[in-house]
Image (tube, rainbow, N blue to C red):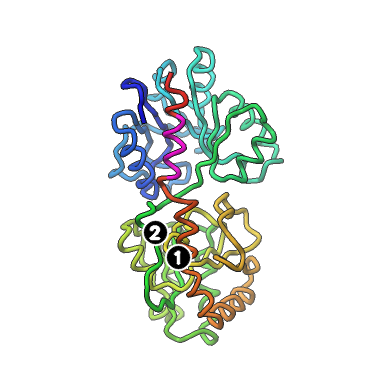
Amino acid sequence: MELSKDKKLIIIQTAVPDYRKGFFKALRDNLGDNFELYSGSHYFEKSIQSDATIPHKKTKNTYLFNARFLIQFEVIKLIASDNLLVLELNPRIISNWILLIGRKIVGKQTILWGHAWPRQGKDASTDTLRQLMRKLASAIVVYTNKQRLELQERMPHKTILAAPNALLNKSQMGATAGNPKHLIYVGRLTKSKKALFLAKAFSNTLDYIPNDVQLLIIGDGEEKAALETFIIENSLAQRIQLLGHISDESRLRELYGTSYFSVSPGYVGLSITQSFGFGVPMIVSRDEDHSPEIEAVLDGENAIFFETNSELSFRESLLNIYNDTNFWLSKRDEIATFCAENYSVEAMARVFCKLLKTYRT
């Protein structure tokens, strides 16, 4: 790709957690010195911390009004930059408003990247502010093709692209041969993710599933202590493993390789594409305020649903999958291939590289 030596893609983030490492590396591999990344130390949710091993220019996140809003003073200097800026589509970031308005006035190109709609959906009253942000942007990048089509309908004359959220390179994807039997949860240990519910529901299925099945819980967060207490009080150390936060790809591949299914007891997030990338299907709580990655689910093909907050429904789901092992084991290669074709970091990075080429002048 031929680019101006001076034109850069500059992405400004609130935080750069470790799960974004592959994506930013793909951008750096493609763009070299034509890529810069700015970030603060942590997100609005403090459990989302920046990874110091991701090369980036540090900017201070100044949180206001009990962390309802933030401003990054250092990046405002980029208001007249000739480079292509990519900002988060988040009305709570005051400095992004300043950059959007200022760059609109001086005729500079600015891209917004993020969820098309608020968590409450496209009809939420708070979408008024997001719509104003969207109007100020030169183009918008959203996380799924469904969101792109929905937003394009509302803004038919705006350039809107989809960069499906991804965690793994194509080369990292693929099902591991063997005889997997365990269940795995990967994510933050927060109330909204419902890891404690998962542990309790799993403990009530032990008389119905093979006695060598373990629940592997990978992550950290506010519910960790409650999970540790629950495991100890119920003598479940041989059946539930709390493994902490793990970001090493080879270790994750090993753990997914021993896992028959992954589980999302709360809302689905990025871990679903990680699970599918390793060829592991997922059990998903049905009626949650899911992140856009739910688009990747093909019910009965790479995932099954259970009724939200129902231990009985969860148990029935486990009975069904452990009674149909031949079918689900036969799907693993297909699941990994589907993910590699649609949710790789290479495909995600390619969208941003094309943007820099489009707006190079």
Q: Secondary structure at mark 2?
A: loop
Which numbered dot is residue 311?
none
Residue 155's spot in the image, x, y percent? 66, 30
Q: Secondary structure at mark 1?
A: loop
Q: Main secondary structure of the magenta part?
A: helix
Going from the N terminus, do you reach mark 1 or mark 2 first?
Answer: 2
Badge 1 crowding class, 10 Å Cα cut-off, few under 14, some 14 to 19, many 20 or more, is many
Q: Looking at the picture, which amino acid does disc 2 mark? A: Met
The quarter of the rendered structure image containing the C terminus is top left
Q: Which residues are magenta?
A: 347-355
Towards the viewer: 98 or 178: 178
Q: Tell whether 332 sits left or right of 266.
A: left
Residue 332's spot in the image, x, y percent? 47, 69
Circle 2 residue: 173
Q: Looking at the picture, which amino acid does disc 1 mark? A: Gly
Q: Is residue 352 magenta?
A: yes
C-alpha distance separating marks 1 and 2: 8 Å
Tell whether label 2 touches label 1 (CB within 8 Å).
yes
